[in-house]
Image (tube, helix red, strand yellow):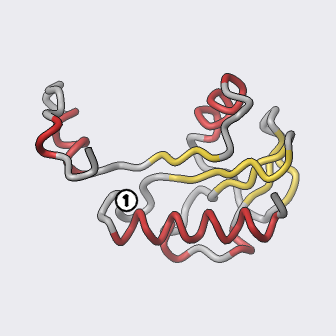
Amino acid sequence: MHRSQAARAILLCCRRLWQAGLIAGQDGNVSVRHRPDRLLVTPRGPLQVDLGPEDLVKVGLDGTHLDGSRQAATELDLHLRIYGCRRDCGAVVQAHPPVATAFSVPGEGIPANVLPEI
């Protein structure tokens, strides 16, 4: 996938996550494998919904920072582990859905009937 296509996919995903209420503030992050050995990932810091293509960070599958003026998402290691385990994985999305977060605080399981996505 070309870098510009990967960037568009990430930015669209961030907007949709925001609109669906699955991320708020600086929560969550998205990465896309745009070459077999390279990722484009959201940066640490800004609101995900406000990102532009120039804000995204290019990293190697070993975590090496390859391009971009910002630092990669704090959860980059999680993304790298997923890509390492699943060579067929083209993207990773990490969100903070409020309902899931609310259930995690007291250690409760999430009943399927409270999530419209299921």
Depth check: 15 or 44 in front?
Answer: 15
The x, y position of residue 47, in whole percent, is 48, 69
Instruction: Give the total of numbered labels.
Output: 1
Residue 90, placed above or below residue 103: below
67 on left or right of 85: right
Residue 34, placed above or below residue 79: below
The x, y position of residue 104, in whole percent, is 22, 33
Quarter in which the N terminus is drawn: bottom right
Q: Label 1 is placed on what type of residue?
A: Ile
Residue drawn at (17%, 25%) of the image: 107
Depth check: 95 or 12 in front?
Answer: 12
Quarter in which the C terminus is drawn: top left
The x, y position of residue 65, in whole percent, is 82, 48
The x, y position of residue 69, in whole percent, is 78, 65
75 on left or right of 85: left
- Quadrant position of residue 92: top right
Residue 105, placed above or below residue 93: above
Q: Secondary structure at mark 1?
A: loop
Depth check: 10 or 102 in front?
Answer: 10
- Quadrant position of residue 52: bottom right
Residue to which mark 1 is pinned: 23
67 on left or right of 106: right
Residue drawn at (63%, 47%) of the image: 91
Residue drawn at (74%, 55%) of the image: 40
Residue drawn at (50%, 65%) of the image: 14
85 on left or right of 19: right
Few, some or many residues within 10 Å of mark 1 (<14, 14–19, 20+):
many
